[in-house]
Amino acid sequence: MSNTFRELLKKVGSGNHTGENLTREEAATATRMMLLGEATPAQIGAFLIAHRIKRPTGEELAGMLDAYDQLGPKLASVSSVRPVMVLGIPYDGRTRTAPISPITALLLATAGQPVVMHGGDRLPTKYGLPLVEIWQGLGVDWTGLTLEKTQQVLEQTGIGFVYTPQHFPLSQSIWEYRDQLGKRPPFATMELIWCPYAGNAHIVAGFVHPPTEAMFQDALARRGVTNFTTVKGLEGSCDLPRDRTAIIGLLTPATSNEIERLHLVPREYGFTSKNVPLGTTVELVEDMQAVLKGIPSELMDTALWNGGFYLWRSGICSDMPAGIAKAKELLTTGAVAAKLQEVTQTIQNLKFTVHNSKLLTIDK
């Protein structure tokens, strides 16, 4: 048993009257001790549920991110005229609405905006459809790449995916506790603003509840982040909804600490107020492949709605209408499909190189 961790547990688990928030340094220490297994299973489980009930603060999230920076992976900086866009999407996936973020990432990369995504397999508590399975359905398998190979894919194609079971195995133990507890611990909140990229980044984080957005803003401000976007998206993701006004928070270095609030109404841009429901994975992949062929559909409208926003937000297009038009052009001309083929071929080449290298070693 760790006496140090017990004292931290006592602070977060003492109830409304005597409980205390952790300092940034204490939150970092607690996170490191949990990831490294220095706290006992009983202590870790108690801490996670107590912290969930108490609710994390922005300062605590900043400390948790500090620990992830110390122990976790980071893709190295790449040459780009724009900050790399890091999309923070819930790791436990989607169960109700069709995701569009892989198409959004391909659109952005096609237009010259690098993108980094991160996540794992089907995870609690939702066990929804994760990003990695969608990519696999499209022919892109991120799961077998080392971090170094993922770095090469990012450099060559403008898209990278940090697959946590492979690149950050220390974090996997926390998911086992989350499954047993049946509740999302603060780690699930922190992961949305985690940035596994060492260069100049533009963090994009989805959220559901307004207090979460405020925590994001506080945590990122404490860490000196001045370029981020928050999206009240579908199922807590970065995907803009079509059934309601999209509520977005914008911060750029030029605006300092002033958050700009943006409300985007789908109907004002010619889109109906309807989200695409999630069917089977096979159906989703087929619909995405139709989008990549430029075939009109409800999912195509979702791709244009999201692509238009992110092309504008990245500075590639001057406004939303220009972004939507650019997204339509890139999809209907086959440019985005070509980018997907480039990513697929790059990964296949890297895996082939590794395979041949192993065979040569065996022959020797």
Image (cartoon, rainbow, N blue to C red):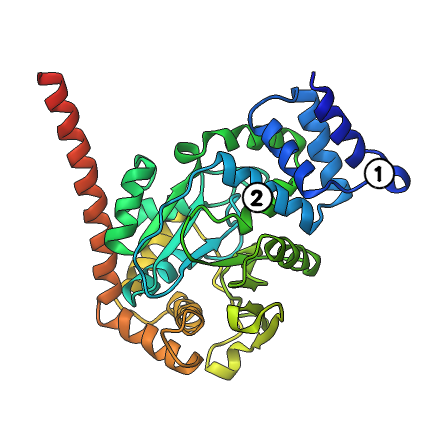
Percent x, y for residue 302? 43, 68
Say which element carries label 2. Answer: helix
Q: Quadrant of the C terminus?
A: top left
Disc 1, SS: loop
At label 2, the amino acid type is Leu
Q: Position of residue 264 (x, y in %)?
A: 55, 76
Q: Quadrant of residue 9?
A: top right
Reading the image, the residue beneath label 1 is 19
| Residue at 60%, 32% in the rendered image | 179
Residue 139 seen by the camera: no
Q: Is residue 120 above or below residue 230?
A: above
Q: Position of residue 169 (x, y in %)?
A: 46, 30
Tell me if I can see residue 72 in this picture.
yes
Residue marked by disc 2: 65
Residue closer to the observer: 137 or 30 = 30
Q: Relative to the observer, which residue lies in front, 71 or 150?
A: 71
Q: Amino acid at mark 1?
A: Gly
| Distance Cα–Cα, label 1 vs label 2 | 22 Å
